[in-house]
Amino acid sequence: MTTQPAFIDGFDRQCSLVWICLGAVTAQAQLRLNLTGTEKFFLAYEPVPVRLEIENFTGTLLALGQEPHTDWLRLRVTTEEGTLVPATAEAMKSPVLDIPAGRQAVVDINVSRFFAAREPGTYFVQAVVNLGPGEEFTSPYVSSDISPGQTIWSQKIGFTSAGKRQAPLPPHETGAWSLYAPLPAGRRRRESIDLRGL
């Protein structure tokens, strides 16, 4: 019985690893994903928009949102500590897209609509495109900072003796207006008026 030299065995294993790596690179090269955020800093409960650009290098028309690629897009949202952020009650639906070979498509997504990223802190968002077994593509992460904001002026609405809320009155009498601004210094100023009423 002939024993194969150790260096040949090791060489074979290295070749296998090289082929596996080349396969992964080839698969990832079929689609190019780029995820960007329109802004970096947001107030809690404010819309957090991101834009996903998808470039098709498969050589054929890519029909997304149709069989067998109906549920092809999802987001992965994590905190700075790596904890997954839970989804909201509204499920994100994959859009219907036809991307010709060599062309690009754009998908705009409001992250805060589908994920409960509302506590102050830094969040990381990644897009994941799944075309089937062994064909999962991921975008680079994009980060967003959520600030609680600071109340700089507010006024409560009045109530009648019967406990019923009065009709809206001018601010100097009673009202439900609040003015908010971000807490961190050195960031671009953003203001919003909360007219929800207490």
Image: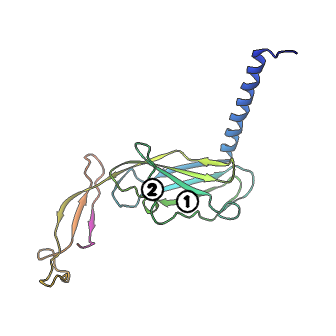
**Relative to 153, residue 80 above or below:** above
Q: For numbered disc 1, what is the local secondary structure?
A: strand
Q: Residue at x 44, y 43 (%)?
A: 82
Q: Classify residue 148 by image quadrant.
A: bottom left
- Position of the N terminus, as image quadrant, is top right
Residue 25 is left or right of residue 117, and the answer is: right
User: Mark 2 sits on what residue?
Assistant: 86
Q: Residue at x 53, y 44 (%)?
A: 140
The location of residue 94, given as percent across then percent down, is 58, 62
**Relative to 150, residue 164 above or below:** below
Q: For numbered disc 2, what is the local secondary structure?
A: loop
Q: Depth check: 74 or 88 in front?
A: 88
Residue 152 is left or right of residue 132, and the answer is: left
**Is residue 3 located in the magenta-colored stretch of the structure?**
no
Where are the magenta residues, as a range? 192-197
**Is residue 195 located in the magenta-colored stretch of the structure?**
yes
Q: Amino acid at mark 1?
A: Val
Query: Few, some or many C-alpha atoms within 10 Å of disc 1 (few <14, some 14-19, many ≥20)?
Result: few
**Relative to 9, residue 185 above or below:** below
User: Mark 1 sits on what residue?
Assistant: 107
**Relative to 24, residue 110 above or below:** below
Q: Residue at x 67, y 60 (%)?
A: 69
